[in-house]
Image (cartoon, rainbow, N blue to C red):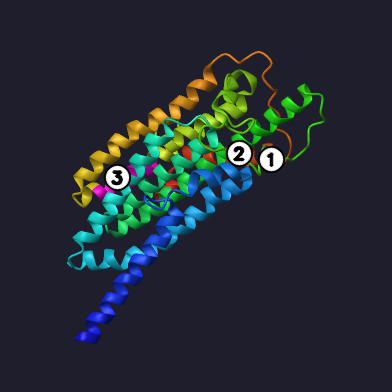
Amino acid sequence: TVQALAGGSFVALSVLLALAGLGFKVAAVPFHTWVPPTYAASPTAVTTALATVSKVAAVAGLVALVRPLAQAHAAGGTVHAAALGLGLVAAVTMTVGGVVALRQHDVVRLIAWSAIAQGGWLLLALASLSEGGLRAASAYAVAYALATVVVLAVVAVVSGSGTAGREVAAGRQPTAGREPAAGRQPTAGREPAAGRELAAYTGLFRRHPGAAFALTLGLLSLAGVPPGVLGLVAKVAVLGPVTNAGLWWLAVVAALNVVLGLAVYLRWVRVLLQAPEPGAPVIDADGPRGLALGLSVSALVGLSVLPQLVLSLVR
């Protein structure tokens, strides 16, 4: 009996440590503090990999770890504590991420806190401890990753154009392919890196309608509102298992966070619609950045038109 108890304790401790490690990768509170400074200090390509590939891999690990709990729950086992724990972490994570994102003026830090909030949505589906919730988390990860790639592709284009414009204005030759301020980490009380401030996107719909459309579609997909149909489908897919499991308190928190997320992303979209400032840099979407933007937005538009391709992951 003593050996069985000891073995059970070790298994429980191992599961908790694995959840903590995967929570770190998915940027769940309280393991989230590394995300904003790391995103802000990294080149956009590295930030994109951290925000998408790393998070999708973490979701795959969480799905594998939670599946035995879901099977035990389906068999009538008592796993209410696990559901409550995952639900609380999901609620706190999405709320903290959304509230802090609403105060950001550095777009990369805004994306970082947005990624934390989106991590809460990924955990939300798992809290239902059902096979449908596991599939919904996978579908949400796909939708989130694609929308984030589109947003960061636009950030790379605008940041590169802003840096080149400032160098030309200063009489220097712009350096092709260079990430703006890649080695510098913006800290509290310090101005965002060149081209990464929210004001750099003022009047983008007039300066480059294509980039503005792509950014708007990506942001509204993250918010889960039309025309971001893919994000809307993903959020509905996540909320279904939660309500089916009777976790109504968690569904209410999620609904409130939809409103909070909408405020975060529409704040950015509002800047795009304003009149451009005099002397604003010309947006150059040619080269590898433009190609990445074109491919990613084409995929996002395609899945928004045919969201059943993502829904097939949930069925």
Residue at the location (57% across, 46% down)?
48
Q: Which circle, 1 or 2, is nearer the viewer?
A: 1
* Three-letter code for the amino acid on which mark 3 is drawn: Leu
Q: Which residue is mark 1?
A: 179
Range drawn in magenta:
233-242
Instruction: Give whichever of 128, 234 is nearer the camera.
Output: 128
Residue that label 2 marks:
153
Q: Does residue 240 belong to the magenta stretch?
A: yes
Q: Dot 1: what SS?
A: loop
Q: Residues within 10 Å of mark 1 (few under 14, many from 20)?
A: some
| Label 3 neighbour load within 10 Å: few <14, some 14-19, many 20+ | many
Whether residue 306 is visible, yes or no, is no
| Residue contact at pointers 3 and 2, CB within 8 angstroms | no
Q: Is residue 217 visible?
A: yes
Q: CA distance from mark 3 to mark 2?
A: 29 Å
Inspect the image, locate mark 1, and give the three-letter code of the amino acid beneath it: Glu
* Residue 286 shown left or right of residue 240 in the figure: right
Q: Secondary structure at mark 2?
A: helix
Q: Is 277 drawn above or below residue 139 in the view shown?
A: above
Mark 3 vs mark 2: give the one in front.
Answer: 2
Q: Which residue does the numbered mark 3 point to in the structure image?
A: 239
- Give residue 7's position: percent from left, percent from top: 28, 81
Earlier sequence position, callout 3 versus callout 1: 1
Q: Is residue 195 magenta?
A: no
Earlier-in-chain disc, 3 versus 2: 2
Between discs 1 and 2, the one toward the N terminus: 2
